[in-house]
Amino acid sequence: MPHETKTTPTACLALADGTLFYGRGFGATGETVAELCFNTAMTGYQEIMTDPSYAGQIVTFTFPHIGNTGVTPEDDETADPAAAGMVVKWDPTEPSNWRSTDTLSNWLASRGRIAIGGIDTRSLTRAIRQQGAPHAALAHNPDGIFDTDALIAKARGFSGLEGLDLAKTVTCAQSYRWDEMRWAWPEGYSRQEAPKHKVVAIDYGAKRNILRCLASAGCDVTVLPASATADDILAHNPDGVFLSNGPGDPAATGAYAVPMIKDILKTDLPVFGICLGHQMLALALGAKTVKMNHGHHGANHPVKDLETNKVEITSMNHGFAVDAQSLPEGIAETHRSLFDGSNCGIRMTDRPVYSVQHHPEASPGPQDSFYLFEKFAAYMAERKA
């Protein structure tokens, strides 16, 4: 049933099955069409909206207090939001945080992103869980006039994320160096001035905080576009290769990324992948990926390290997963979701090559998973020794 608000609706969310939700629009005006997902994180809405892995998706936030800490340029994971839109329970209030430089609504409007408040997000989340991530159209019109039939038709016409290579739309246009380290009190972000390892990071939609974690682990980071070849990478004479997170279907991006990864695997270089990088490493090693019903999106996902029996509280953002049953001989499953048993990590048994599905740089633990970056640095140090 449509969700009714007490005031005149200025925004409408239309699902492909014909369900309509009315609410109050904020941010930019206009329309957008995308896959609809939900995120259970209680903090980090700005980081979520600017995470390139959310390209092609409208994010429903299950936590009601979205916008209450405002926004700050320091928390952007990329220059512009990647998520297509935002759905929240309550309208954002005036921000209250010493780091805030603007309101969420102004920030969204300046970046052309539409949001809707006043929605029964519990009902919407339940629908997503039961039916799978639906295709949706989101419209914001201050006049409150909506052609709902047209919105439903647009939602039904959305192609979906399967078979879609979105990494090429969010990757960097050219290579660049990165030396900024993780935020620390009281100085904020500092620079890595004594790096020990040269790392080439392939940008399939890399978050800035991943690059900061690499720098904090002692790496001199050079970022290359998603289309980089093995020759492009090896020309930098790296000590290790990092495969970043990103959006879309790993099989589609893998059309050009997997051959490159296979060539890198012919060398003795340590390789570390996160999220989409994890999925594409698995494809290069001979495993398969599958589209999930509604994916994992949140900062409260328990993941078990199968080799130490340690449980990490992790941040997740993925709609595809590696099929653990398809892992070939010589590839060990290292991590597993305690929510649904899906694969969350792999490694080669005879090489310094490994990857994880979750986001160790997002620090929900908060330090549970940083060892993964230190492990990468240790592998590079061993190789040089």
Image (cartoon, rainbow, N blue to C red):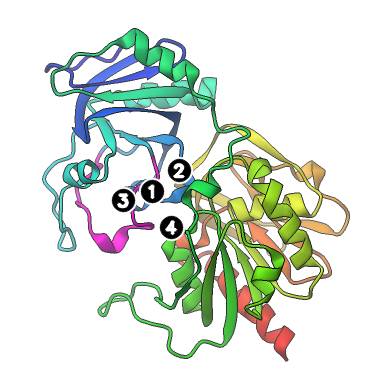
Is disc 4 surrounded by few (<14), some (14 to 19) or many (20+) residues within 10 Å? many
**Which residue is pictured at 45% across the width and 49% down the height?**
52
Give amino acid for label 2.
Tyr
The residues tagged by marks 1 and 3 sit, at their Cα atoms, a distance apart of 5 Å
CB within 8 Å, label 4 to label 2? no
Q: Quadrant of the N terminus?
A: top left
What is the distance, in whole Å, between disc 1 and disc 2 at their CAs?
8 Å
Classify 18 as above or below 299: above
Q: CA distance from mark 4 to mark 3?
A: 15 Å
The image shows residue 335 at horizontal and vertical percentages of 67, 55
Residues in magenta? Answer: 65-83
SS majority, magenta: loop
Q: Secondary structure at mark 2?
A: helix
Q: Nearer the viewer, residue 191 or 253?
A: 253
Circle number at residue 46: 3
Q: Secondary structure at mark 3?
A: helix
Q: Earlier in the sequence, mark 1 or mark 2?
A: 1
Q: Quadrant of residue 25?
A: top left
Residue identified by numbered label 4: 364
Q: Residues within 10 Å of mark 3 (few under 14, many from 20)?
A: many
